[in-house]
Image: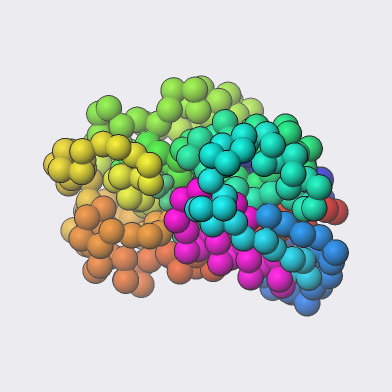
Amino acid sequence: MSKLNQLLSLAELSPATLNDLLNLALNVKQQPEKYTRALAGKSIALIFEKPSLRTRVSFDVGIYKLGGHSVYLDQQNGAMGKRETVADFGRNLACWTDAIVARVFSQQTLEQLAQASHKPVINALSDLYHPCQALADLLALKERFGDLSKVHLAYVGDGNNVCHSLMIGAALSGMKMTVVTPQGFSPDAQVLLNVQKIALDTGAVLELSPHLSAAAGADAIYTDTWLSMGDKADPELIERVFKPYQINTAVMQRLAVKYFMHCLPAHREHEVTSEVLDSEASLVLLQAENRMHAQNAVLISLFA
Ligand code: CP
Ligand code: NVA
């Protein structure tokens, strides 16, 4: 298993490292007793500039299960750049902790933290990426389909942080991915370029379309909130633009898609109906459960 130094975007992983990491996550899930001392003596700071349920609890509980200790800094104490600069925050944390997990408004904050602290930094969601989520999602797909290079994933909705990390993960795994976004809400151009570069090496296929019909025949359809945390767009305008992209039973049937995926929290009857979210086709709780196993694999390989 190759050693990780940090997890800022997922693009720092090679296809082989990602594959190793997913295999390790599967092993951690199946044989947790093998890893109960993996983080013995290690302390990890969990900094959250934004709200969280899944990420916060899965890191906290996951670190405990690996024999480590976590220190949670909430939106008041973890508001970097307010009482002191991000760099000073990072330098101080490095005096006591072995790694930093951070959910931040700006990707730049993670880079500044990593540089100042010289400690491994894990991105727990930023404006640009959500790599821990993508790892859990890939693990869920691996459990359902085995060989990821044979999977066709469709993402429908806003070209946001979750979409970016999924595109990177899909490209590294040699998957086919169709990204359906309304005009003006496409993924970031720089991220796209990077994903296309990775895909050239792995044989992954990336399709972009404003038409929901492009998702037809996918193995799984994935959606996320239409308005991410920190996004200042007008909610009424967003609702109007995105309404035709709602995932409901009729859409699932028309597109002949087997599984539904969502990072959660879901906005019921907006991007997805309760009927689909709570259906047999929904993988959302498997994805949520896998957050912990995937993150624990990341933590284990940081200190391997
Ligand atoms: N999916 C996810 O990151 O959930 P939280 O915002 O609750 O952490
Ligand atoms: N795109 C969403 C994901 C939440 C887990 C957000 O950034 O708010």
> Residue 82: where, in percent of width, then height?
54, 39
> Residue 249: where, in percent of width, then height?
22, 62
Answer yes or no: is residue 13 visible. no
Magenta segment's dominant SS is: helix
> Residue 236: where, in percent of width, then height?
15, 43
Residue under the image location 49 percent in, 22 percent down: 190
Colouring: rainbow
Using the image, determine if residue 197 lies above or below residue 154: above
- Of all residues shown, which one is farthest toward the front? 83
Task: Please give the range of residues in magenta.
Answer: 46-65
Residue under the image location 36 percent in, 45 percent down: 228
Using the image, determine if residue 240 lies above or below residue 69: above
Q: Is residue 123 left or right of residue 42?
A: left
* Picture quadrant where residue 275 is located: bottom left
* Picture quadrant where residue 294 is located: bottom right
Would you say residue 287 sits in the magenta stretch? no
Which part of the image, by quadrant, shows the C terminus? bottom right
